[in-house]
Amino acid sequence: MHPPHHPGRIVVSNLTKRFGAIRAVDDLSFTVEPGTVTGFLGPNGAGKTTTLRMLLGLVAPTHGIATIGGYRYADLTRPLEVVGAALEASGFHKRRTGLAHLRVLCAAAGLPARRADEVLDLVGMSPAAGRRVGSYSMGMRQRLGLAQALLGDPRVLILDEPANGLDPAGISWLRELLRSLAAAGKTVLVSSHLLSEVEQTVDDVVIIAAGRSVRQGRVAELKAQAHSGVRVRTPHADRLVRALPGVPVRAAGEPGVLLIERVHAADIGRVALAAGVELHELTPLQSDLQELFLALTNEKATIR
Ligand SMILES: Nc1ncnc2c1ncn2[C@@H]1O[C@H](COP(=O)(O)OP(=O)(O)OP(=O)(O)O)[C@@H](O)[C@H]1O
């Protein structure tokens, strides 16, 4: 078991935020453990940003509590060294260079100025360090936000839609970076409205819709659930169908190829063996996580 107050653990307990009549976040609880990347997922307006802002002490909860290492953000003595956050890539002085921006933050936090150069290097921004932020592309601003989050070498990283604006190479770079941070024992919480965007990066998911938790757990478990079936090629299709009474089987349009929904390849292999049916192909169909995500969030996904 983990110690009750691991310094890198994020705990959200019965968190609620009302804006007038809107319950932006509604009795939400989850935990994020050190050494993992957790995807915080939900459709537009689900309450992700509001939750992250409560974690960072930027919005006061109506009820409940959010802590990092057992403390509310406001009670952290050296917050930059505990938690780094990138909420949205727009809060920069446009006329300052990326390097100058980070050096100001270093000075304010009592960090050595060279840390600014180090984090710019870490996010691949050294070549643009001397350019004004106003001239940066959206992806470059995202990287600068990430550099800022990494400044104090914090145990915990909270990133709101960090893949926004990144090109495919940038997304795969981000994936590697987040994985390496988790491997180094950091706690990484990353929000997205696309499960497919983060499924290769995250260990765990917290899925919310309309402010409420709809699913939490290992992404591997979700993938197993999303598994949509198998494709079978056999010269004895009729006999295989007869050996699977009650199981929905579709013809794939190619001779001898069947598509069987919501089954595991091993089960079909076993049935075929028992029935003496020769198989020439038995392929698990691509899991469609995004579809499962939509099904989980759909009924609550209306914009409030
Ligand atoms: N300051 C505010 N005042 C009033 N309503 C707000 C405020 N901030 C957020 N909301 C409302 O709370 C709900 C949740 O918004 P939030 O930004 O947390 O969602 P999100 O999951 O981050 O969405 P997105 O993916 O679109 O960024 C929305 O209905 C939003 O309009």
Image (cartoon, rainbow, N blue to C red):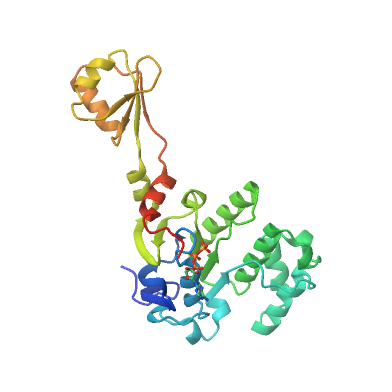
154 shown above or below 238: below
**Residue shown at 36%/44% (left/top)?**
226
Quadrant in the picture for residue 140: bottom right
Residue 98 location, x and y as percent? 75, 69
135 shown above or below 286: below
Position of 74 with respect to 256 (left or right) is: right
226 shown above or below 31: above
**Residue shown at 35%/57% (left/top)?**
217
Q: Is residue 67 visible?
A: no
Q: In front here: 89 or 201?
A: 89
Q: In front here: 4 or 44?
A: 44
Quadrant in the picture for residue 30: bottom left
Residue 299 location, x and y as percent? 36, 55
Position of 18 with respect to 76 (left or right) is: left
Residue 86 location, x and y as percent? 59, 68
Quadrant holding the C terminus: bottom left
**Residue shown at 60%/57% (left/top)?**
164
Q: Is residue 195 visible?
A: yes
Number of callouts = 0
Quadrant holding the N terminus: bottom left
252 shown above or below 300: above
Q: In front here: 210 or 152?
A: 210
Q: In front here: 212 or 278?
A: 212
